[in-house]
Image (cartoon, rainbow, N blue to C red):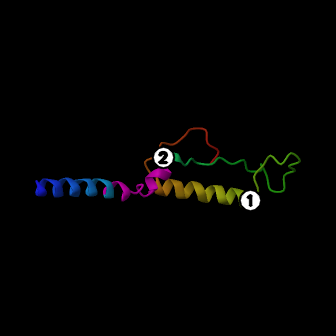
Amino acid sequence: MRRAMQSATLAILLATSSACARHAPPRTVSDLCLTAQRISAEPAPSAGADDPGNHYDTDETLFQILEHNEVLDRLCPARPTHHGEAL
């Protein structure tokens, strides 16, 4: 009887301690590949073009968009490509 009681107590302790020890799985590059998207850009048609409505992206913004898209393509090579993207 005593051995059965010890076994039951041990089983309860193991069950409750393992529940507390569970952690969320680490985020990986694959998580990024499931959610991140390429960014489209709108460059000015020519250098110094008038942009009164602030419609075109600046050179710095274009650089950052290209950098983002290159990293995404490198980390997630199996991603399907989307037709009609500006960059």
Q: Nearer the viewer, residue 17 or 86?
A: 17
Q: Position of residue 2 (x, y in %)?
A: 12, 57
Which residue type carries mark 2?
Answer: Leu
- Give the residue at x 32% y 54%: 16
Q: How crowded is mark 1: few (under 14 residues within 10 Å), some or many (20 or more)?
A: few
Q: Where is residue 27 in the image (x, y as percent from the top left)?
A: 45, 56
Q: Where does the magenta region start and end?
A: 18-33
With 65 as the anchor, is 21 left or right in this view?
Answer: left
- Mark 1 falls on what kind of element? helix
Q: Nearer the viewer, residue 83 or 30?
A: 30
Give the residue number, with chain letter if any, for mark 2. 34
In this rendering, which labeled residue sits more in front, label 1 or label 2? 2
With 22 as the anchor, is 13 left or right in this view?
Answer: left
With 42 as the anchor, is 66 left or right in this view?
Answer: left
- Give the residue at x 69% y 56%: 62
- Give the residue at x 83% y 48%: 54
Q: Do the residues labelled 1 and 2 touch (CB within 8 Å)?
A: no
Q: Quadrant of residue 69?
A: bottom right
Give the residue number, with chain letter if any, for mark 1. 59
Q: Position of residue 19 (x, y in %)?
A: 35, 54
Tell whether position 24 is magenta.
yes
With 36 as the anchor, is 61 left or right in this view?
Answer: right
Tell whether position 23 is magenta.
yes
